[in-house]
Amino acid sequence: MSEIRFYFDFGSPNAYLSHRLLPDIAQRTGPSLRYVPVLLRGVLKMAGNQSPAQAVGNINNKLPHPQL
């Protein structure tokens, strides 16, 4: 039997949205679903990468996010 390994970070809104869809997909297609928690910051650091907020955070012409 095949397995879907879902690597997720608790703080990620995208992980939450994916989590809402994955159980139905797994049920329709047959594989089991295995949740694997990760710290995205640690994965990025290990890969020598940065989050987009850090990578483009110091751009002078970038407009600040408007407060609602």
Image (cartoon, rainbow, N blue to C red):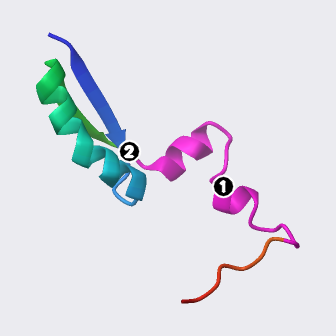
- Crowding around mark 1 (Cα neighbors within 10 Å: few <14, some 14 to 19, many 20+) is few
Q: Is residue 22 above or below residue 62?
A: above
Residue 15 is tagged as none
Q: In the rendered structure, which amino acid carries the disc numbered 2?
A: Val
**Distance from label 2 to label 1 (Cα)?**
18 Å
- Residues 65 and 38: in front is 65
* Residue 61 position by quadrant: bottom right
Q: Is residue 60 left or right of residue 29?
A: right
Q: In the rendered structure, which amino acid carries the disc numbered 1?
A: Pro
Q: Is residue 20 left or right of residue 47?
A: left
Q: Is residue 48 above or below residue 28?
A: below
Name the residue rendered at 65%, 62% in the picture.
53
Give the residue at mark 1. 52
Tell me where the magenta segment starts and ends, as one range. 39-61
Element class at badge 1: helix
Q: Earlier in the sequence, mark 2 or mark 1?
A: 2
Residue 38 is tagged as 2
